Image (tube, grey):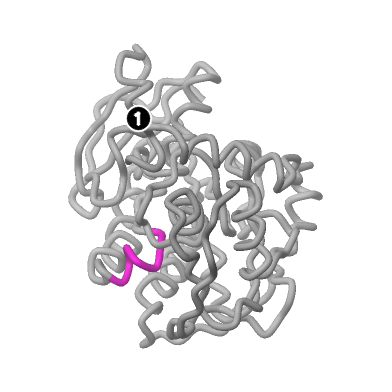
Amino acid sequence: MDRVLITGGAGFIGSHLCARFLHEGCEVICIDNFSTGRPANIYPFRNHEGFQLITYDVTGYLHIKGPVSLVLHFASPASPKDFLEMPIQTLKVGSLGTHKALGLAKAKNAGFLLASTSEVYGDPEEHPQSESYTGRVDPVGLRGVYDEAKRFAEAMVMAYHRSHGIPTRIARIFNTYGPGMRVGDGRVLPNFFTQALRNEPLTIYGDGSHTRSFCYIDDLVEGLYRLCFTDYSEPVNLGNPEEISMLDLAREIIRITGSRSSLEFRELPEGDPVRRRPDIRLAMERLDWKPLVDRKTGLQKTLDYFRGNNGLNA
């Protein structure tokens, strides 16, 4: 890979991918309109000779001078708070944005990787969720704008692969955490860390029994990087299969932060999945990949970030 384009490159995952490809000696073109991405995430690369930032909305016509070897499409609001506040933008970037990014890959004869999501499974009846499970999604529910945007994006990627022969990859990304997350984005770990460090009550939705599985960002980036170099075009789950309830996670955060926070229970949001855990056997087989960072280590690294100027004060 000589020249890599990353849409949403100033976002949490996108910025870590920028760092990885720069480290591998690639030129990196980062496209972001900063609707949810943060300039602070790409600040370390600002003077890197191989890094180029283009401030742009990828739902518009996408033209890049020169060759491009690989397009990674990560532009999209990704937290419930963001996509509920920007429902139309979320639908547009999943549909028009994916179309424009695929068109660029086709024009440049480049590979393409779509950042899809575990949300394509909706509130699953299968547990853990494997790639063959087609999901249980409410298209007109509040979360449908994100779920269906990603499902449509997957369909478009496969259409371009089958019709035009573009080497495409689809990563179904499960909950990911680590340095670079945005305070106030509404996801559970930024919420818990921020509340715990401020000794505020940790907000738990429902009775705390619903579960998630959390993958540390370094592990996810390694999985994504390996996926770029396979010839497998069908969706691949990337996540950590270690499952934990929200109640247990809240108690864990309070313990490692030494917080005086209490727990505050609120009504479960509409359509919030009760259980979420990836079946990663396909990734293990095709990518020789599995998460290596245990939750204790990952949470401590994330805590250090939220305690710093780039975290709690971001």
User: Which structural element holds mark 1?
Assistant: helix
Q: Which of 86 and 252 is in front in this view?
A: 252
Q: Nearer the viewer, residue 162 or 283?
A: 283
| Residue 293 visible in this rendered orientation of the protein | yes
Residue 280 image point, x, y percent? 74, 57
Q: Which residue is drawn at 52% across and 70% down?
A: 119
For the record, the magenta segment spans: 78-84
Quadrant in which residue 76 is drawn: bottom left
Q: What residue type is labelled 1?
A: Ile
Q: Residue at x 65, y 42 (%)?
A: 298
In the depicted structure, whether residue 15 falls above or below residue 184: above
Residue 307 image point, x, y percent? 47, 37
Residue 91 image point, x, y percent? 30, 68
Q: In this view, does 181 lie to the left or right of 222?
A: left
Q: Quick one: which residue is furthest to the front in this view?
A: 260
Q: In this view, does 156 lie to the left or right of 265?
A: left
In the depicted structure, whether residue 145 falls above or below residue 153: below
Quadrant in which residue 32 is drawn: top left
Residue 250 image point, x, y percent? 60, 63
| Residue 238 visible in this rendered orientation of the protein | no
In the depicted structure, whether residue 271 falls above or below residue 258: below
Q: Which of 210 and 147 is in front in this view?
A: 210
- Check disc 1: other Cα within 10 Å, few if <14, some if 14-19, many if 20+: many
Magenta span: helix, strand or loop, mainly? helix
In the depicted structure, whether residue 83 falls above or below residue 164: below
Q: Is residue 79 magenta?
A: yes
Q: Mark 1 points at which residue?
A: 42
Quarter of the figure with the C terminus:
top left
